[in-house]
Amino acid sequence: MRRSLAANKIEKHASSTLKIIAGLAFVILVPLGVRSCLLSEGNWVTCRLRTVAGEIQFRLYPDRAPLTVANFLRYVEAGLYNDSTFFRVVTPDNQPNNKVKIEVIQGGDVAEAKCFPPVVHETTAQTGLKHRDGTVSMARDVPGTASSSFFICIGRQPELDFGGRRNPDGQGFAAFGRVVKGMDVVRRIQRMECEGQYLKKPVLITSLIRLLKPSELPGNAGTKAWRGTGIGVIREAVKAGFERMTFFYYLTLFLILALAGWLGWRGFIRQRWARREAPVWEGSSWAAGRETRPWLRALTLVVFLVLASLFGIMLIGM
């Protein structure tokens, strides 16, 4: 039995609505995904260290090692690491008197007269941070004597963790960050010519600064702040956001774009191609000749209404 003309008209309008919503997914989902991913700041601080051998970037974890990170940033903000050096490298071949061997490079030789008071020792048992490839940690003598000097691990170094055998007191060293860019520079420094464990030509640290988080940049104080903002500030904001993105955020952005693309295909492209062969639009299908189940139409409508609401809230809150 043929359905009534009114029923077909209602379903046709419903189908058109779904197509419009699917198309708007590109407008709604992409800005939402980009903004949430690029401007996700995380619970960390990023520092950029430039040397004559290349650039290294650290990610510090103040939520896990608050005292150690605060101590390190005191030196950074005061500019005391500028013009200091990487002066010591430890390799398997230059520590003949050590039963437990490690691989690190050490830097941050600030003059004693300029050093701040030593920081309380935060063990890896307290922070949960381990000495792995690229870990940034504080050099020390006895616990509670760390000041400015820090080192970077090359490869896994479990003997530097709490309970490790490298230091007789078993307290290990205070890890507080990791290298996120420039491990090739770290390894290059380790391979440089040295006498014993000290470089013949220490590697000059030309600058060590804390990078601003996206929300701290002038171009990220809201939509109004973008007006009149130079392209350089916008580029800096986007670059800073990408550098802070983790695998989770990349995956989220990919899934959002994939969903938008799939719905766009179902709602527009595939239907248009199908119409070339079968110009008759049948009922409420998204593609000619293919019926869409009612529960799928309802679910899609709910999902996009929720996303549209979130997008509106996001715009209001900018």
Image (cartoon, helix red, strand yellow):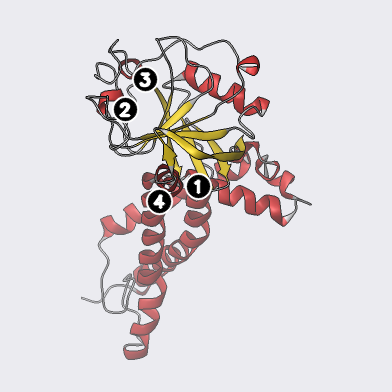
Quickly name the residue at label 2: 130
Of the image marks 2 and 3, the number of the one nearer the N terminus: 2
- Determine whether the residue tagged by mark 4 lies in a helix, strand or loop: helix
Residue at the spot of label 1: 243
Label 1 secondary element: helix
The CA distance from mark 2 to mark 3 is 10 Å
Say what secondary structure mark 3 lies in: loop
Residue 244: x and y in percent read: 49, 43
Identify the residue at image location x=40%, y=10%: 142
Closer to us: mark 1 or mark 2?
A: 2
Query: What is the residue that sits farthest to the right in this orientation?
Result: 228
Q: CA distance from mark 2 to mark 4?
A: 25 Å
Q: Which residue is mark 3?
A: 173
Task: Name which residue type carries label 3.
Answer: Phe
Q: Residues within 10 Å of mark 1 (few under 14, many from 20)?
A: some
Q: Assign the N terminus to one quadrant of the image.
A: bottom left
C-alpha distance separating marks 3 and 1: 28 Å
| In this rendering, the label closer to the viewer, 1 or 4 | 1
Q: Residue 250 — which label?
A: 4
Q: Taking 116 as reference, is 92 above or below it?
A: below
* Circle 2 residues within 10 Å: few <14, some 14–19, many ≥20: many
Residue 314: name its quadrant: top right
